[in-house]
Amino acid sequence: KQEVTQIPAALSVPEGENLVLNCSFTDSAIYNLQWFRQDPGKGLTSLLLIQSSQREQTSGRLNASLDKSSGRSTLYIAASQPGDSATYLCAVWGGSEKLVFGKGTKLTVNP
Amino acid sequence: GAGVSQTPSNKVTEKGKYVELRCDPISGHTALYWYRQSLGQGPEFLIYFQGTGAADDSGLPNDRFFAVRPEGSVSTLKIQRTERGDSAVYLCASSLGPSQETQYFGPGTRLLVL
């Protein structure tokens, strides 16, 4: 059974800092990995999707990498801003049609 | 264009009652998913529809939970004899097709069972 772990559970940084969020998964036989953002009381917003054949994806200040062999992905946020404060969720798609999610990392960017 | 919408946004009910939660997917999306998110947890898969049929309902916790998508668009999640443990945010997502497609999520329905 696929399990997804996100470390740290919470992170607080000053504005302008570069940061890395970590995601690990137990079964490397995945088709893709997706990073989401969730604001309090809101649904999920898709940030980046990395296909299993890809190593990384970039969107603006966000860069996500995928290493299937080690079962890891990282989300890099450059020059963090208070508006980046949210919970970031990692999810993997492994052959069935369902996404398996981690518990998320709650990020707070302080002005 | 319009995103995934869910109604109601909040639902408070009493233990033992029946509830229906509705999801309107993005127009043209053939795949529809239901997830449940408890406080402090990531979403957990409940059921997946491809068109009108439930292709995978392995995440439904028990037979009190049922979902339909009769015309391949709108879906309704039905919970009978609600229990306090059913309290959670129920999220709906849709994608253009199955397999490797980005899933787009709705804002969720917050269910509270008293």
Image: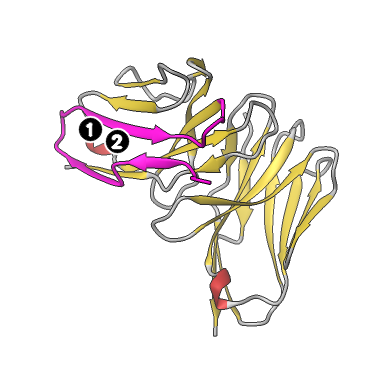
Question: Which image quarter: residue A33?
Answer: top right
Q: In the image, what residue type sits under mark 1? A: Glu
Q: In the image, what residue type sits under mark 2? A: Asp
Report if the CB atoms under discs 2 and 1 are less than 8 Å apart.
Answer: yes
Q: Which residue is painted at 16% across and 29% down in the image?
A: B17
Q: Is residue B52 magenta?
A: no
- Residue at mark 2 to residue at mark 1: CA–CA distance: 5 Å
Q: State the residue in front, A62 or B114.
A: A62
Outermost residue toward the bottom? A111
Mark 2 and mark 1, same subunit?
yes
Q: Which residue is painted at 53% across and 34% down in the image?
A: B94
On screen, residue A17 above or below B69 = below
Q: Which residue is painted at 64% across and 33% down in the image?
A: A2
- From the image, which quarter does the C terminus of chain B lie in? top left
SS class, disc 1: loop
Q: Is residue B25 magenta?
A: yes
Q: Position of residue B32 (x, y in %)?
A: 51, 29
Q: Position of residue A18 (x, y in %)?
A: 72, 75
Q: Is residue B114 left or right of residue A62?
A: left
The range drawn in magenta is: B1-30
Tell me the tag on residue A74.
none
- Residue occupied by mark 1: B83
Q: Is residue B95 left or right of residue A95?
A: left
**Mark 2 chain:** B
Q: State the residue in front, B99 or A90.
A: B99
